[in-house]
Image (tube, grey):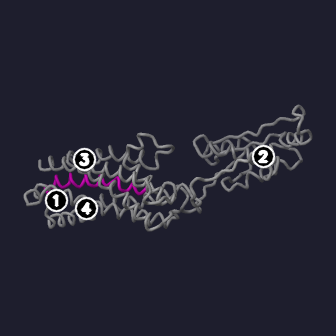
Amino acid sequence: MGYKQIKALVKKEILRLIKEPALLFLIVIFPIALTLSFGVAFGQVGDGGESTYSIGWVNYDDNQTHWATSFRSNLSSNEMLRLEDYNSLDDALDKLQAGELSGVVVVPDNFGDSIESYWNSPQDTGSWINSSVELYVDESSLVMKQTLTPLIQQSYVDTLYGSEQTTIETPVDVELISAVETKETSMFDVFMPGLFAFGVIFLTMSIAQGITGEKKEGLLKRIWLTPTKSTDVMTSYAISNVLIAVFQMSLILALGLALGFQAILTPASVVMSYVMILPLAVLCIGLGLIVGVVSKNDGMATGLSFVFIIPMMFLGTFVSMGEPTAVNKAMPSYYATESIKSLLFRGIDPLSATILTNFGILTAMAAVVFVIGSLVFARFSRK
């Protein structure tokens, strides 16, 4: 192995990445834009980290009691909701259809009478005046579909019994205890660990495009006329792009912290997070070698790169929600994302069995892919 050749090739590769606008975008601008976009979209920039939803309030209760007013007060005390009064349901529904409201609450004309009849005869259901509070929700908002109904029900219970009481006294009290101690978090905090993998995954495309460009310009052919070996070229690709991956992770971490990422930072957790990114970078380098060699031009390299990028993005990072499936666990990016999440978000021991197992699996995947990529590159890059 020629160390002088490797040093020269590493320098050449880094200069190429810096001078090429498209690759510079993937390395620097893309991680910045991605992190800023998620910071804005999920509440860490501009509004203090909390989202609010506008809810239309239509009160048809002409009863002189305080129940409707109390109901509205309890509902508006929730910081997620901002209530707007409307005189008619049609006006409120027009705003809902236009996307200016996330939901509409309609209080019936016998709401107060209904509650009064309950308190007059709590045990005599036959004497109650039944009524229904109508709720209209924006079907396109998953958050409202899942959360507004429970919020309305809780506000109604608070109105009826007071916030310190429950409808039924039981000998068993259910207390929710968090299994994992974390700080108060936002969606941005949950998604941040996946952004590190996002940036690294795109190394596949930058390497593939670089190789096709060098083939087109005849640079690879000129390299093969020198004493340089294929192992020297592959080693230079690995070193230069691993350095790029470390730079990207540092950039995303610094920007995330500036935007309010609630990370649990210790020297050990930070170091192990970088360690988890390294095999993912090596794996993406191997994929880039394969794609770059088999591609005829930049367009083909870009298209083939996304064959690998899309599954790792959508199945191996935060995009795939819920319990991980076998398909999720087949993605290398899954192990990097989950490990970084446990290290920086959950505060797990960096040398725990979970982290070491994930590192072992990811390293094995990276070794296989990089070896295959190296063999393909050595076999076909001279043609």
Distance, label 4 to label 2, CA atoms, is 62 Å
Which is nearer the N-term, disc 3 or disc 1? 1
x, y (%) of residue 216? 16, 52
Q: Are marks 3 and 2 in contact (CB under 8 Å)?
A: no
x, y (%) of residue 145? 62, 42
Q: Nearer the viewer, residue 331 or 38?
A: 331
Instruction: Give the residues drawn in magenta, as a range.
Output: 195-219
Amino acid type, mark 3:
Val
Q: Nearer the viewer, residue 262 or 145?
A: 262
Distance, label 4 to label 1, CA atoms, is 11 Å
Amino acid type, mark 4:
Ile
Amino acid type, mark 1:
Asp
Callout 3: helix, strand or loop? helix
Check the image and report above or below for 90 versus 55. above
Instruction: Mark 4 vs mark 3: give the one in front.
Output: 4
> Is disc 1 surrounded by few (<14), some (14 to 19) or many (20+) residues within 10 Å?
many
Residue at point 88%, 48% (across, down): 65
Residue at point 21%, 59% (across, down): 235
Say which mark, if any, is on residue 232: 1
Which is nearer the N-term, disc 4 or disc 3? 4
Distance, label 3 to label 1, CA atoms, is 19 Å
Q: Is residue 232 left or right of residue 368?
A: left
Q: Are marks 2 and 1 in contact (CB under 8 Å)?
A: no
Q: Nearer the viewer, residue 203 or 233?
A: 233
Q: Which residue is mark 3?
A: 291
Which is nearer the N-term, disc 2 or disc 1? 2
Callout 4: helix, strand or loop? helix
